[in-house]
Amino acid sequence: MLDDITAFYRELGSRASIYHPFKKDYFRENEEVLKAHGYTYTPEEDHRVMLLTEGNQIEAQRRLDIRVLNRWDEKVATDILVPSKEPWEVEVTKRRVAAEGSYLFVGYLDGEAVVYTDIHRAEDDSNTRFDYIVTNKKHRGKGYASELLSFVVEYCKENSFPMCWQWAGPSEPICYRAGFREAFTMEGGFASGPEI
């Protein structure tokens, strides 16, 4: 599998990077296997995990046409990721969205995709993970990410999605307003693949 990951990122012209899975000490326990495939483990500070436990306090302005998609929309790439200089996320997000239990939420403004996120409902229906919220650079700071997150939180509640969580990060302030609260920490780190 590591060779497949390396090949995937090479096709994108990028060095592979694998983030720490949920199993404690996974990278440390598998360090020899990683090394044999040219990967280097780099520990990081623990990741803080936020759970959706409170009410949504975002007062969205309802300017966006928000759609829930079960398939990829190329406008996410052409309108958001490529102009925002995040082209590596295109193939990664396409694959995530193609997986069972994944939902793509896209906010459109006058037909242009300006913000998106995706969520993943676990196969055993035990939890729902939120992924990154990405806004086109020219549309940042206008509240579109807040509007989208508010929609997604309400969608999950209305459809009885199980425990919703995400990693605390740059969007933490709006996540807090949407009802997410820090719940626990988990081991952080990543493994970098061979140089390209």
Image (tube, rainbow, N blue to C red):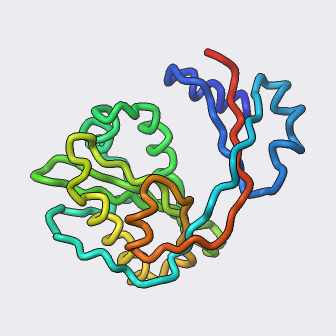
Image quadrant in which you'd find residue 178: bottom left
The single residue placed furthest to the left in the displayed view is 110
13 left or right, relative to 177: right
Q: Nearer the viewer, residue 188 or 118?
A: 188
* Residue 100, percent from left and from top: 53, 60
Using the image, determine if residue 66 lies above or below residue 91: below
Between 175 and 3, the one nearer to me in the picture: 175
Residue 115 coordinates in the image, percent (x, y): 29, 52
Point 31% across, 44% down: residue:
76
Horizontal side of residue 10 vs 83, given as left or right = right
Residue 139 coordinates in the image, percent (x, y): 21, 47
Q: Quadrant of the C terminus?
A: top right
Given the current orientation, which residue lies at the most extreme top position? 196
> Residue 133 at what x, y percent from top left?
39, 54
Instruction: State the quadrant of the N terminus.
Output: top right
Residue drawn at x 54%, y 23% as measured from the top left: 14
Q: Is residue 187 above or below residue 9?
A: below
Q: Is residue 107 above or below residue 194?
A: below
Q: Is residue 85 left or right of residue 128?
A: left
Residue 75 or 173: which is nearer the viewer?
173
Q: Quadrant of residue 173?
A: bottom left
Number of numbered discs overlaid on the protein picture: 0
Q: Residue at x 30, y 75 (%)?
A: 58
